[in-house]
Image: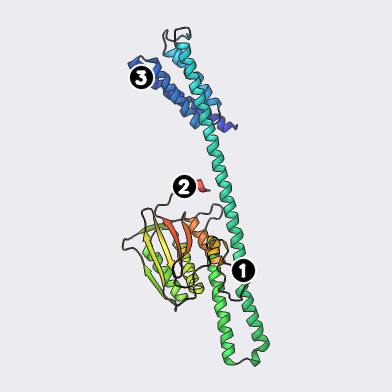
Amino acid sequence: MSRRTLLQNILVTGVLLGVSTAVAVVFFHYSRNSTSVAIIYVLTVMLIARYTTGYVPGIIAALIGVACVNYVFTYPYMNLNFTIDGYPVTFLGMMVVSTITSTMTTNFKKQSQLLNEREKLLMEAEKETMRANLLRAVSHDLRTPLTSIIGMAQAYEESGDRLTSQEKTQMVANIREDADWLLNMVENLLSVTRIRMEDARVTTSPEPLEEVVAGAVQRFRKRLPDAKVRVRVPDEFLMVPMDPVLIGQVIINLLENAVYHSDSEEDIDLYVEKLPDEVVFHVRDYGKGIAPERLNTIFDGAGVDSSGSGDSHKGMGIGLTICKTIVMAHQGEIWALNRSQGAEFAFSLPLQWEEAEAEDRV
């Protein structure tokens, strides 16, 4: 036991015994009932066992409590006397109850501590898995467009004199498209740097929901002007705790995912619903849906197609993995499901930022 813990145990035990003795004196002055005074000391022992470390403080408090009841509150006063009929049994019972209470409370605290440590280890393992999946997704989603750019640039350099004007224009357009995709990946990675990776949390502030959604949709339409999105938000003015830049990036990632992977030209639905304790963002397309075997792992880098098709837009890994990282850092949840036509991605954000709960998670 450290010196600091020892001093804390002594201080807590002394203060609680002093307060309980003062209360017992006042109570005994009006009631003259030593049995009720004994109950006060039993409760004190329970509090001491709860707020100290180890068995010793509770047992010492039980001994002191028994002695105080006998010495101060039992006739003859200010004199230890265990020979009076009934008192030896009473005091022995108090000692047993107090000791058992102290032991049970201490065991409960130890079990709680072990559970907290186990939860921390599980969270650390989950964060390490997330980092590994993110690196795998990054390596795939960045390598594919880079390979495409290098290949087209090399072909242009070696065969530029033999290419028609239309072929040159198409190659430059493909290079620009892949460069834009790389820029989007870099923006995603920069978004992750806003998260405190040591505890996977973000700094939040109440933000107007409608403005965050409108800003994300505006950025998305600048990037993909031909995409059509139907937007619906609650009529109620909502202030939601969030990092607006990060949540905006999640919305953009999910909208782009719907454009590139749905194989549908129908409008995409983006709508937000308010529940009692949270708001839920939905992005739904009307395309081919998601393969059922990929639903449970799609946010863990499973969107990466290891065979590689050469299309830089086929990799979903990094975008969805970053979405999961951002949403979890906001104490929310994210999921995907198939509808009768197309797929739907959704994520939730709590309406109240629970600081105490956030501290317990790290």
Q: Determine which quarter of the picture holds residue 159.
A: bottom right
**Disc 2 designates what residue?**
357
Q: Nearer the viewer, residue 221 or 284?
A: 284
Q: Nearer the viewer, residue 19 or 333?
A: 333
Q: Residue at x 45, y 48 (%)?
A: 355
Circle 2: residue type = Glu
Circle 1: residue type = His
**Disc 3 designates what residue?**
27
> In the structure shown, which secondary structural element does the residue marked by tag 2 occupy?
helix
Question: Residue 118 appears at what percent x and percent y?
Answer: 57, 44
Q: Residue at x 59, y 88 (%)?
A: 168
Left or right of residue 138: residue 243: left
For label 3, the crowd category at 10 Å Cα-Cα, with few meaning under 14, some 14 to 19 and many 20 or more, is some
Q: Please report whichever mark, 1 or 2, sits nearer to the chain's N-terminal start.
A: 1
Q: Residue at x 48, y 73 (%)?
A: 259
Q: Please report whichever mark, 3 or 1, sits nearer to the chain's N-terminal start.
A: 3
Question: Residue 321 appears at what percent x and percent y?
Answer: 54, 62
Question: Residue 360 appears at what percent x and percent y?
Answer: 50, 46
For label 1, the crowd category at 10 Å Cα-Cα, with few meaning under 14, some 14 to 19 and many 20 or more, is many
Q: Residue at x 57, y 84 (%)?
A: 172
Circle 3: residue type = Phe
The residues bearing labels 3 and 1 have C-alpha atoms spaced at a distance of 75 Å
Question: Residue 18 appears at what percent x and percent y?
Answer: 44, 23
Q: Determine which quarter of the picture holds residue 304.
A: bottom right
Would you place residue 82 above or below residue 290 in this image?
Answer: above
> In the structure shown, which secondary structural element does the residue marked by tag 1 occupy?
helix
Query: Which disc number belongs to residue 333?
Result: none
Please name which of the two marks, 3 or 1, marks the residue nearer to the observer: 1
Q: Nearer the viewer, residue 151 or 5?
A: 151
